């Protein structure tokens, strides 16, 4: 939508990653978020699971450009046009952080050591905000906090 902020989303990493079951989030868990999000939303998801592809078909507010992104240069070009990136712990989260783009990183309860502990930020990427699971497999509260974070971003932008 014209005039709205633009947000890019990555909800899962490579299925072959040793910790993929903990770091990836089934797309169906985001369905409520995309119903009311006042952002133009794009999927930066390169590898799409069959179950997520079916859910994506029912989310008209999430535009899928992942298949068109063939390398990090193209992904970086799209990220440069976004206002915020939302990602689980994947290369896209690191790319957005390295670019200095605002990025919200969704982390499992037992996150990788790089994200340290008990903090909502990281010294690696000053523009990153970390949203951690308070308990194992509690993505619902993380997504609720993400909805609040996105509403606050929208409100701050409207207040400018």
Image: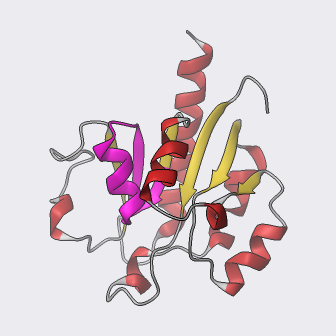
* Residue under the point 55% across and 45% down: 78
116 displayed left or right of 132: left
Q: Is residue 89 magenta?
A: yes
Picture coordinates of residue 22 (x, y %)? 39, 80
Picture coordinates of residue 147 (x, y %)? 58, 46
**Of the pair 11 and 141, the residue shown nearer to us:** 11
Q: Is residue 74 magenta?
A: no
Count the numbered circles shown.
Answer: 0
Picture coordinates of residue 115 (x, y %)? 21, 59
* Residue under the point 41% across and 44% down: 103
134 displayed left or right of 48: left
**Of the pair 32 and 18, the residue shown nearer to us:** 18
Question: Which residues lie in the magenta part?
Answer: 86-106
Depicted 43 relative to depicted 158: above or below: below
56 displayed left or right of 98: right
For residue 45, say whether it is visible.
yes
**Of the pair 64 and 19, the residue shown nearer to us:** 64
* Residue under the point 47% across and 75% down: 24
- In which quadrant will I find the N terminus? top right
* Residue under the point 65% across and 61% down: 68
The image's colouring method is: secondary structure
Picture coordinates of residue 18 (x, y %)? 32, 89
Q: Quadrant of residue 65?
A: bottom right
Depicted 107 relative to depicted 130: above or below: below
- In which quadrant will I find the C terminus? top right
**Of the pair 98 and 159, the residue shown nearer to us:** 98
For residue 145, say whether it is visible.
no
């Amino acid at each position: 939508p014209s005039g709205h902020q633009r947000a890019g989303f990555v909800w899962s990493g490579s299925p072959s990653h040793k910790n993929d079951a903990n770091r990836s989030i089934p797309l169906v868990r985001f369905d409520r978020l995309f119903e009311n999000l006042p952002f133009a939303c794009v999927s930066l998801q390169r590898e799409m699971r069959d179950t997520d592809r079916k859910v994506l078909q029912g989310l008209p507010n999430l535009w899928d450009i992942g298949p068109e992104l063939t390398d990090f240069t193209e992904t970086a070009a799209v990220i440069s046009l976004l206002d915020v990136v939302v990602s689980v712990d994947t290369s896209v989260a690191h790319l957005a952080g390295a670019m200095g783009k605002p990025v919200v990183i969704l982390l499992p309860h037992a996150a990788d050591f790089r994200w340290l502990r008990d903090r909502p930020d990281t010294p690696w990427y000053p523009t990153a905000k970390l949203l951690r699971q308070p308990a194992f497999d509690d993505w619902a509260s993380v997504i609720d906090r993400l909805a609040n974070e996105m509403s606050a971003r929208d409100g701050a932008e409207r207040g400018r």
